[in-house]
Amino acid sequence: MIRFKFAADKAYAALHEMVSNHPGIDLHAALKTCYFADKTHLNEHLRPIFGATYRAMRFGPVPLEIYEMAKAESLWLAELGVESVPWTLAGYRLRPSGASQVDTSALSRSNREHLRAGLERSLSMSFDERTAATHGPDWQAAELGYMRYEDMLDDRPDKDEVIEMLREKARFMRL
């Protein structure tokens, strides 16, 4: 199975930017943005942005670490070396808490491009449309368990070789 080391700093920057630019963003929209961006970046650059662990849930893929971070779980506060996150989760909405500067320096240009496209895609859809758009073959193969990056890769002539390379090197990649 392909496993990447989760890039907590990138997830923090992405969430902070989404919440700052779209106060009150729905948690479903934010998490699906991360999924869309991770998947398209994986297919274009052979590495995801975040390397999250995706769980196939009823309403689509959930990047577990990012979900925990959105809820400000103390494990991620300690990992990031912060006392609190600059947002609050009220119901299913993420809202800014205080005025803090967004730092996207952890995100590469390609990361930002894929996140922007993923956010536009996510925000242009209703909850039901986002759910349907994320119930593809990768979600279906997981059978409400953990999703595999192997299944997120689009069909391509060298897919088997790419999967083998990623199985060997993914855990050592710096995302």
Image (cartoon, helix red, strand yellow):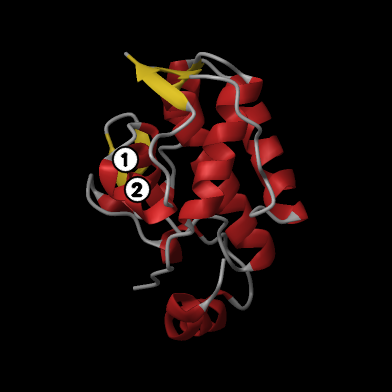
Dots 2 and 1: beta carbons under 8 Å? Answer: yes
Q: Residue extending furthest front?
A: 83
Q: Nearer the viewer, residue 2 or 10?
A: 10
* Disc 2 residue crowd, few under 14, some 14–19, many 20+, Cα 10 Å: many
Q: Is the residue 23 above or below the residue 44 in the image?
A: above
Q: Is the residue 6 above or below the residue 64 in the image?
A: below
Residue 36 can be seen, yes or no = no
| Residue in the picture at 66% in, 22% down | 21
Earlier along the polypeptide chain: callout 2 or callout 1?
1
For discs 2 and 1, the disc positioned in front in the rendered view: 2
Q: Which mark is residue 76?
A: 2
Label 1: which residue?
68
- Name the element at disc 1: helix
Q: Is residue 149 left or right of residue 165?
A: left
Residue 93 can be seen, yes or no = yes
Quarter location, residue 117: top right
* Disc 1 residue crowd, few under 14, some 14–19, many 20+, Cα 10 Å: few
Q: Is residue 106 left or right of residue 90?
A: right
| Residue in the picture at 28% in, 49% down | 75
Q: Position of residue 164 (x, y in %)?
A: 47, 83
Q: CA distance from mark 2 to mark 1?
A: 8 Å
* Quarter of the figure that contains the C terminus: bottom right
- Name the element at disc 2: helix
| Residue in the picture at 60% in, 28% down | 100
Q: Nearer the viewer, residue 45 or 132?
A: 45
Q: Nearer the viewer, residue 28 or 151?
A: 28
